[in-house]
């Protein structure tokens, strides 16, 4: 009798506690998603896509509310969902900026590695140096600008001119990094295309070259589409009025980055 009771308890344990695991078969997609999101880069790309998707959707939902108001189906031409999406996008943006702070260590490490194991060409070495040094300028100024914003307290209280200086020059340093990254990715893509065209490769090497090509193509799409936004943010008053340009280009950039990161995860 005791054995029967024990068996029923064990069966109940398995039914309740093991239900999800038992009914979730091994999945290559889940494994790949975990690999992608377990890195800072993958999580940042995903959150950027979420942030700008919310910003792109919000005006359309507001426009829908305005149409409903004109048709007499809504008392006011406003949408709480629109307001919520913009607030959510702001929270995601703040989370991305805070999460990125330790990433400065990556560029310090990369600079050290470049000097100890430099690439074959001087051009590639200097390109790597420019990328890392520009980000060493970017991060301190970025966080001075961030912590002087009203939404962060502000935690730092400095003159407005100094805060604007930090914001503009952090974006300009980011722009230098992005231009250098575009040059690096374009050179990498040219090299992959040359190998595909000139070298006799087996099926395994062909698959590897195809993955590298996809990585460079999506990286170029992500960074080239980011350049107009960086230019817009790097000058006082910006270069255009419609922020949907920023949101649309940033969403495109994020989706291209996610696609490229997913391909190599």
Image (tube, rainbow, N blue to C red):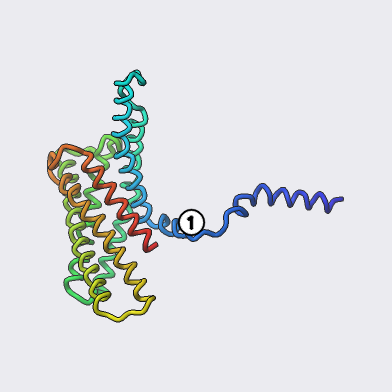
Q: For the C terminus, which image quadrant?
A: bottom left
Q: Position of residue 115 (x, y in %)?
A: 24, 72
Position above or below: 106 against 84:
below
Specify few, some or many for label 1: CA neighbours under 10 Å numbering under 14, 14-19, or 20 or more.
Answer: few
What residue lies at 87% left-to-right and 50% top-to-bottom?
1
Depth check: 86 or 118 in front?
A: 86
Position above or below: 155 against 3:
above
Residue 205 picture quarter: bottom left
Q: Secondary structure at mark 1?
A: helix
What residue lies at 23% left-to-right and 45% top-to-bottom?
144
Q: Position of residue 172 (x, y in %)?
A: 16, 51
Q: Residue furthest front?
A: 71
Count of picture labels: 1
Q: Position of residue 232 (x, y in %)?
A: 16, 45
Q: Position of residue 35 (x, y in %)?
A: 43, 59
Depth check: 101 or 83 in front?
A: 83
Depth check: 36 or 142 in front?
A: 36
What residue did someone put label 1 on? 30
What residue lies at 24% left-to-right and 51% top-to-bottom?
140
Position above or below: 160 against 28:
above
What residue lies at 25% left-to-right and 56% top-to-bottom?
221
Horizontally, is 265 left or right of 234 in the view?
Answer: right
Residue 59 picture quarter: top left
Horizontally, is 251 left or right of 7 in the view?
Answer: left
């Amino acid at each position: 009798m005791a054995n029967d009771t024990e068996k029923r308890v064990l069966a109940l344990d398995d039914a309740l506690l093991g239900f999800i695991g038992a009914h979730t078969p091994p999945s290559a997609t889940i494994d790949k998603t975990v690999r992608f999101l377990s890195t800072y880069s993958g999580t940042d790309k995903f959150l950027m896509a979420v942030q700008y998707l919310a910003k792109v959707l919000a005006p359309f939902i507001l426009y829908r509310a305005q149409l409903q108001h004109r048709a007499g189906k809504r008392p006011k031409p406003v949408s709480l969902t629109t307001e919520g999406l913009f607030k959510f996008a702001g929270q995601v943006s703040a989370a991305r900026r805070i999460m990125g702070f330790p990433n400065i260590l990556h560029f310090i490490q990369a600079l050290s590695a470049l000097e100890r194991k430099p690439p074959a060409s001087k051009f590639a070495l200097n390109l790597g140096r420019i990328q890392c040094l520009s980000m060493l300028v970017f991060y301190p100024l970025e966080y001075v600008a961030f912590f002087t914003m009203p939404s962060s307290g502000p935690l730092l209280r400095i003159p407005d001119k100094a805060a604007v200086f930090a914001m503009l020059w952090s974006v300009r340093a980011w722009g230098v990094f992005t231009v250098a990254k575009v040059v690096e990715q374009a050179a990498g893509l040219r090299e992959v295309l040359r190998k595909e065209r000139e070298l006799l490769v087996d099926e395994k090497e062909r698959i590897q070259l195809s993955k590298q090509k996809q990585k460079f193509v999506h990286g170029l799409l992500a960074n080239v589409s980011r350049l107009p936004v960086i230019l817009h943010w790097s000058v006082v008053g910006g270069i255009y009025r419609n922020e949907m340009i920023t949101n649309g280009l940033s969403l495109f950039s994020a989706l291209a980055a996610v696609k490229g990161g997913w391909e190599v995860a």
